[in-house]
Image: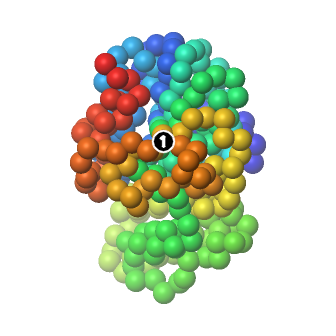
């Protein structure tokens, strides 16, 4: 895999402006709810906002890319944007935190950058296997275990896809749902892309230890989401969110807290 294989897909500009940019690593959920990046692009005035979406990349022909590859692709494309003036913020929510931190460190080599990690989470074996079981269960009661996560990651993702495809075909045949195979296929590649990203985060043992050029701030509503993998607690700031945030899709209230930090009025 080379970064040129990903360059056209991972970064999308959402708003105009040429200084103090905000990059947001977020993902299209299986809903029509607006994304964090979209909410910020409407609330931060004339600041340029960019959306980093690795899941869309991993839903295509590229089934797996390492976190350093994804981050370097993002950094390369951003450097060509013309919006690289002033202080930059790179925002990552939950499992996107590792990617946001990687991107921030790469770009901090020649500009001031702050990584803003919102309720950060760090995917591990348990999370990847748990999501595999959850998604496989959507297609049927499979007894097939999660593939060995220590194997070649491209083969792991290929095996996950084949398991899902077998389960999907069995479900369609057993319930006479052949006409729904197109919709099932869209769901399958979203599941595959999300698991490929979680696997890349799980495999990135050096996150947080790759230079530490960027300043880091954690926004959290719980002691369980203040850890930054690979960094001592003295190496970053922690800002408490004013109230517990609901699980699930990003809310306008949560986006407002981020906007207040990265673009105070």
Q: Nearer the viewer, residue 201 or 54?
A: 201
Disc 1 on helix, strand or loop? strand
Q: Can residue 25 be seen in the rendering of this structure?
A: no
* Colouring used for the render: rainbow
- Residue occupying the far front of the picture: 234
Where residue 140 sits in the image (x, y, percent)? 39, 79
Question: Quadrant location of the C terminus?
Answer: top left
Residue shown at 32% from the left, 51% from the top: 221
Residue lying furthest bottom: 143
**x 32%, y 77%: residue:** 175
Apparent side of residue 183 relative to residue 143 in the rendered image (left or right) = left
| Image position of 177 (left or right of 116) | left
Could you tell me residue 178's position as x and y percent?
38, 68
At x 39%, y 42%, the residue is 239
> Counting other residues with Cα less than 10 Å from the Cα at mark 1, is it few (<14), some (14-19), or many (20 or more)?
some
Question: Does residue 219 sit above or below 47 in this rendering?
Answer: below
Residue pointed to by mark 1: 237
- x, y percentage for residue 58? 57, 50
| Depth check, front residue: 178 or 224 | 224
């Amino acid at each position: 895999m080379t970064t040129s294989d990903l360059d056209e897909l991972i970064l999308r500009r959402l708003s105009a402006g040429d200084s103090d940019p905000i990059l947001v690593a977020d993902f299209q959920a299986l809903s029509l709810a607006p994304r964090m990046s979209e909410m910020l692009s409407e609330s931060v005035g004339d600041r340029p906002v960019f959306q980093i979406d690795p899941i869309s990349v991993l839903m295509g022909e590229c089934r797996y890319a390492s976190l350093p590859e994804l981050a370097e692709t993002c950094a390369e494309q951003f450097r060509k944007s013309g919006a690289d003036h002033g202080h930059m913020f790179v925002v990552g929510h939950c499992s996107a935190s590792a990617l946001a931190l990687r991107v921030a460190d790469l770009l901090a080599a020649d500009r001031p950058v702050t990584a803003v990690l919102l309720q950060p989470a760090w995917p591990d074996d348990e999370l990847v296997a748990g999501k595999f079981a959850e998604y496989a269960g959507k297609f049927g009661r499979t007894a097939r275990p999660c593939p060995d996560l220590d194997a070649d990651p491209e083969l792991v993702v290929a095996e996950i896809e084949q398991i899902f495809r077998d389960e999907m075909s069995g479900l369609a045949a057993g319930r006479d749902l052949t006409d729904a195979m197109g919709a099932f296929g869209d769901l399958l590649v979203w599941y595959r892309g999300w698991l490929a990203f979680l696997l890349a985060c799980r495999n990135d043992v050096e996150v947080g230890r790759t230079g530490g050029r960027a300043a880091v701030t954690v926004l959290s509503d719980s002691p369980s989401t203040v850890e930054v993998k690979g960094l001592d607690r003295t190496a970053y700031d922690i800002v408490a969110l004013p109230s517990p945030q609901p699980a699930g899709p990003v809310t306008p209230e949560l986006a407002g807290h981020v906007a207040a930090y990265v673009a105070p009025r």
